[in-house]
Image (cartoon, rainbow, N blue to C red):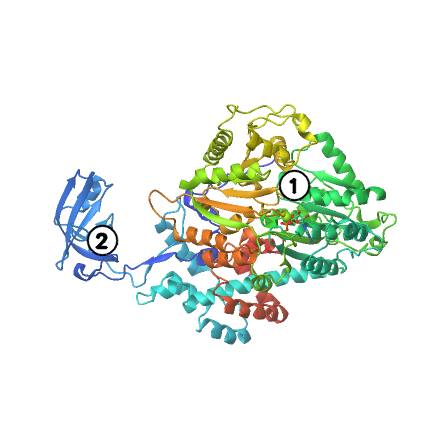
Amino acid sequence: MPDAPPAPRKELSAPQKALHKLGLTRDIDLALHLPLRYEDETRVVRLSDAREGQTVQVEGTVTHQEITMRPRRQLLVTLDDGSDTCTLRFFSFYPSHQKALAVGARVRVRGEIRGGFMGRTMMHPAFHAAGGELPDALTPVYPTSAQLPQAYLRKVVASGLARADLSETIPPELLGSLQRVVHGAWTLRDALRYLHHPGPDVSLDALEDRSHPAWQRLKAEELLAQQLSQLTAKRERDALRAPVLRTASGGLHEQLLAVLPFALTGAQRRVGAEIARDLARHVPMHRLLQGDVGSGKTVVAALAAAIAIDSGWQCALMAPTEILAEQHFAKLIGWLEPLLAPLGKRVAWLTGSQKKKQRTEMLALIASGEAALVVGTHAVIQDQVVFQNLALAIIDEQHRFGVAQRLALRSKMGPLAKEGESSPERRGTGFAGPQALPLEGLSGDAQRASDGGEPHMLMMTATPIPRTLAMSYYADLDVSTIDELPPGRTPIVTKVVSDQRRHEVIERIRAQVAQGRQVYWVCPLIEESEALDLSNATETHAELSAALNSSHAPFRRDVSLSKAPEGPALPVQGRVPPPSAEGARERGEAASAAQGGAPVLVGLLHSRMPVAEKKAVMSLFTSGHMGVLVSTTVIEVGVDVPNASLMVIEHAERFGLSQLHQLRGRVGRGAAASACVLLYTPPDGGRLGETARERLKAMAETNDGFEIARRDLEIRGPGEFLGARQSGAAMLRFADLATDGHLLDWARTAAAQMLQQHPAAAEKHIARWLGSKAEYLKA
Ligand code: ADP
Ligand code: MG
């Protein structure tokens, strides 16, 4: 029988599509879609009682109507309610407006009262015919999108709320303590009904700052769901097996410690021991290593990798971009590669820009196990990559990876993870398992670990969150913190400077370059327009090239660097040092440039450049040939050029605090005194906004990443902190950890008890709150 033609799929209407886009698919999602604010249409006030700035509803008769042309075309309507009059002004209007607001019409109008020389005014008020019943609850205003009219959304939310299953999931023995922390006996149903349609007598303040018991109940529920899902994930993971990894006497770990050009800091030793302890257990590690920029996380990662390799297993290291992977792991590879060679082992690279032939070679090395260490970008988690025996996955700058990518890396361990399981993600990730011979000269632990199924995971981040917060929130993540910088760093001096003093900054650059130092100049990312972003950086690049080379030979545009090691033409201005300078690089070059009249090489780096060009520019900068590097935020993390001593951030007011701190961390890596200049441009004639000023002030006042994190938390609240970017945990929509610590404490205790004694209710609670996101929380 021929296949029946596919049934015509029912097209979703535009608002339905918009609902889906907002994630409002289930009744419960609609019920949990809470108002941004409320409008009070429950009462009509007298005009004479309305204060300026108040949004009110009034009812009256139109006594006058005219269209004026000055200062611009507008419709003016005078409304009289018997107590006073008010002018309604419309700059955009239709004939229907004129008709509905004809002299003599009785209308109900809602808007904000303003003063002014024309007397009371409302701009573009909402209006309809007078009379009609007044609602008895406040009217909710929901967060929405352009395709989703407020009136439509109100209707679907109301019906979602009516249909949703809001039965109690919290067991009776936990309700007492819940009611104590939320200050009231609110059920979820009552709380939601109330928050969608509060009565007119409510304290709008308590609703707005979410201190109202109905809000508290909701936030407690949300935190409970987060804690439950994380605890569940932890329990599931604890039931899985991972290979037992131990150092071997005389092995790689020992050798690496011996060749390191420095002694580990106390903090590095401590976190190293925490990681080693985890790796030696047959439960998969799930640990976040947090430490300020420059605190030396990479060496800790290298030591962890050495332990895995010592035990005869493979380790994968992943960084968010190719430049970062290269820059960031160069040292690590420099240390490990020579130690691996005598063992017949190698380091494999996997990146998106690789040539096919090279890639095929690398894939073979990885599959055969000859590559003990695999380093790369997202390319590491692609389907064709088959590890021989992956035991440890390390993710650097983990907040820059999506949750799905982290899950994919975990799945690389292969199909032995759960008996017979072959979920789609696991397709093509063959797993040869540890029957592979243990490395010669290394321990035989691989043999004993042959029941291993999950890799250990180490995630690293330089965007720390306060430790107490991390510990209580991440129920399923162990946190190691490096709270000490390597010795011998000179603190970075940070200056906040108006863009009007830009020329002084350029002079300062000239002086730094004259001393043989190097300089970063970062231009902001303009979210809405990559093109604008680029032109901004390009202009600055031209400006700096011209200014720094002003009294010398006219600068040439886009000099082709055909003699440079990498070959391709580069967006570099200024003359290129002669190839003979290769050996004699170091700082003398740039110094002679600025002093002796030779041009200063100014490079440009932005995200749209081909990878080969980026690499070529980076290598000129890291080798010391380039004095100044102008870039968009591609250098945000990880780049390590100790000779760079000055960081200029243009439009610093547009950056987030942690991003500024990360950028600043690119300097101050050597012994030289370093500085960071935060250039700001106030809006036309005005002052910077309050939060921007607070951010810049925080930067000028402290270099401590944890203090920065604490201030950041204060300035913008932790929602974003713990949101998808930071942790992969679903964002907290309602709770705010800065103010809701008491609710979190309750949720932690309650979650443990509920999981133990009421697993079915726990499951129901997680599904209600997290729906399809629950799976993601396990990454
Ligand atoms: P991050 O934590 O930002 O990744 P890195 O691992 O890149 O920091 O380390 C920053 C710099 O400090 C590197 O040049 C690294 O070699 C160096 N370093 C790391 N640990 C020490 C130490 N204990 N003593 C001296 N220098 C160190
Ligand atoms: Mg790093």
Q: Secondary structure at mark 2?
A: loop
Q: Secondary structure at mark 1?
A: helix
The residue sitting at 85% across, 43% down in the picture is 342
Q: Which residue has dot 2 on it? A: 114
Whether residue 490 sits left or right of residue 252 in the image: it is left
One can see residue 609 in this view = no
Going from N to C along the chain, the mark reached first, 2 or 1, is 2
x, y percent for residue 223:
53, 63
In this picture, is 570 found above or below 73?
Answer: above
x, y percent for residue 310:
81, 51
Q: Quadrant of residue 279?
A: bottom right
Whether residue 618 sits left or right of residue 34 in the image: it is right
Question: Separation of disc 2 and disc 1 at Cα?
Answer: 58 Å
x, y percent for residue 539:
47, 32
Location of the N terminus by quadrant is: top right
Judge by depth and name the residue closer to the eye, 492 or 165: 492
Q: Quadrant of residue 623?
A: top right
The residue sitting at 45% across, 57% down in the picture is 715
The residue sitting at 40% across, 52% down in the picture is 143
Q: Which residue has dot 1 on it? A: 327
Q: Residues within 10 Å of mark 1 (few under 14, many from 20)?
A: many
Judge by depth and name the residue closer to the eye, 165 or 111: 111
Which residue reaches farthest front? 596
Which residue reaches farthest right? 441
x, y percent for residue 438:
85, 49
Judge by depth and name the residue closer to the eye, 589 or 574: 589
